[in-house]
Image: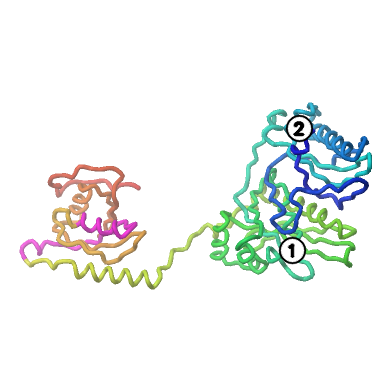
């Protein structure tokens, strides 16, 4: 059995007991939050596999224990998914196993006693057992791991055991799509204990957009220690949304400080189950107010630029010469899509080139939106609409207003638009 095929990670069931030859260390074991990778692999997990193996030395006994754990784990997984046990050869199991989780182990000179967890590749295992591996997931939910210890609330202000526990959590099999953060960069400023008390949707919407999430889940734990190294009581609470609507709460206890990780991992399992039940019952729907985008408020610089552009356009518009034709000239409001300044200039030129148009001046500029032009035309609004459609515009008519935009395809301009021609408003 090649050890390189198995990733050894620290598990959930208690302190690591070491004896005899050597120390077993987890991959990437070092200080800092970045040393705990976020596990979202989605592997099938079988926990609580007991092994007791003897060998000629400690390393041989440990390898034999892992080999037996793979066999027992596969039997337990197949019985859980299909209702009956099945067996596979060691070579096939080596290709299926993605990791061994050490829950508790004792290593002697020639004996290995441990409780292990085995991770199996979800896709391969499902194909062999003939079961579906598809998981229906919720909308992306930003997870905020809030820990109270010593009367102080922390999220990412400092590295906490609670955030490390959530990074260890294997969420691939959960129906809740957790968006978990490492706590690096701007995370500590955007997501902190004070942020969890805010209810303003505008600020939450800005934060959620940074991480591609639709809503927020606040997973809270309060740690109470009787004395250093002694019993610890953890009070857990699952909350949803900016209003922190409660989902569930409960308390767990361990007898000594060395079992803190086991306490937190057990709490996360129950919180995840509560979130999944809330999702199945329809209580975990994203907040509708978070999906609403308020209208953008223009800055003073933009308003000044619009006023200057309108004044310049008014000065550049020639005054119509009084005459027989000017008596029949009417003024209409025309709205036009202007994604850029170049589009505005081109639209004004195109409208001025329509037969019968005496003037076209922009009175309200909105780059990236809809600008407003005042158009002088010799005829009725219906004739102006027909003339614009003949020039390839899509036109929608309202009471005294036309909304125009460039059509998707080219059209052949009419030689002389008929005043009585009827048209159907173009659909977007």
Where's residue 137, x and y in %? 63, 45
Q: Tell me: 13 left or right of 213.
A: right
Question: Which label lies toward us, 1 or 2?
Answer: 2
Residue wearing tag 1: 147
Q: Nearer the viewer, residue 385 or 34?
A: 34
Tell me, yes or no, whether the highlighted magenta stretch contains residue 249.
no
Where's residue 310, x and y in %? 26, 69
Badge 1 or badge 2: first in the primary sequence: 2
Please tell me whether mark 2 sits on a helix, a strand or a loop. Answer: helix
Q: Nearer the viewer, residue 134 or 285?
A: 134
* Residues shaded magenta: 323-351
- Mark number displayed over residue 94: 2
Looking at this view, name the residue that lies furthest to the left. 324
Where's residue 31, x and y in %? 75, 58
Point out the image quarter for the N terminus. Answer: top right
Tell me, yes or no, whether the highlighted magenta stretch contains residue 331.
yes
How packed is label 2: few (under 14 Cα within 10 Å), some, or many (20 or more)?
Answer: some
- Mark number displayed over residue 336: none
């Amino acid at each position: 059995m090649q050890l390189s095929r198995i990733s050894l990670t620290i598990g959930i069931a208690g302190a690591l007991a070491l004896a005899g030859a050597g120390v077993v260390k987890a991959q990437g074991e070092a200080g800092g939050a970045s040393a705990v990778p976020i596990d979202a692999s989605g592997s099938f997990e079988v926990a609580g596999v007991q092994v007791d193996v003897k060998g000629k030395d400690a390393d041989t006994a440990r390898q034999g224990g892992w080999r037996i754990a793979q066999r027992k784990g596969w039997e337990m997984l197949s019985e859980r998914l299909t209702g009956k046990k099945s067996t596979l050869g060691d070579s096939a199991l080596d290709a299926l196993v993605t990791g061994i989780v050490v829950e508790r182990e004792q290593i002697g000179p020639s004996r290995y006693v441990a409780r292990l967890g085995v991770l199996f590749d979800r896709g391969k295992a499902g194909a062999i057992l003939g079961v579906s591996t598809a998981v229906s997931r919720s909308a992306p939910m930003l997870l905020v791991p809030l820990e109270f210890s010593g009367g102080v609330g922390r999220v990412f202000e400092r590295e906490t055991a609670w955030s490390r526990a959530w990074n260890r959590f294997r969420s691939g099999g959960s129906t809740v799509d957790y968006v978990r953060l490492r706590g690096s960069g701007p995370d500590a400023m955007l997501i902190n204990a004070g942020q969890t008390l805010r209810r303003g949707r505008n600020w939450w919407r800005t934060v959620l957009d940074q991480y591609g999430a639709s809503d927020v889940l606040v997973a809270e734990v309060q740690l109470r220690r009787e004395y250093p190294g002694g019993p610890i009581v953890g009070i857990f609470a699952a909350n949803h949304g900016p209003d922190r609507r409660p989902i569930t709460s409960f308390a767990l206890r361990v007898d000594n400080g060395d079992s803190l990780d086991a306490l937190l991992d057990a709490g996360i399992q129950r919180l995840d189950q509560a979130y999944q039940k809330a999702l199945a019952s329809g209580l975990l729907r994203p907040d509708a107010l978070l999906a609403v985008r308020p209208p953008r408020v223009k800055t003073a610089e933009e308003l000044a630029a619009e006023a200057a552009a309108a004044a310049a356009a008014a000065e550049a518009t020639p005054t119509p010469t009084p005459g027989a034709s000017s008596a029949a000239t009417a003024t209409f409001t025309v709205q036009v899509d202007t994604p850029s300044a170049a589009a505005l200039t081109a639209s004004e030129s195109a409208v001025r080139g329509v037969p019968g148009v005496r003037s076209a001046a922009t009175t309200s500029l909105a780059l990236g939106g809809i600008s407003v032009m005042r158009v002088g035309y010799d005829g009725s609004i219906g004739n102006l609409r027909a003339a614009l459609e003949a020039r390839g515009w899509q036109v929608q008519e309202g009471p005294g207003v036309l909304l125009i935009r460039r059509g998707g395809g080219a059209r052949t301009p009419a030689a002389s638009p008929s005043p009585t021609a009827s048209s159907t408003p173009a659909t977007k």
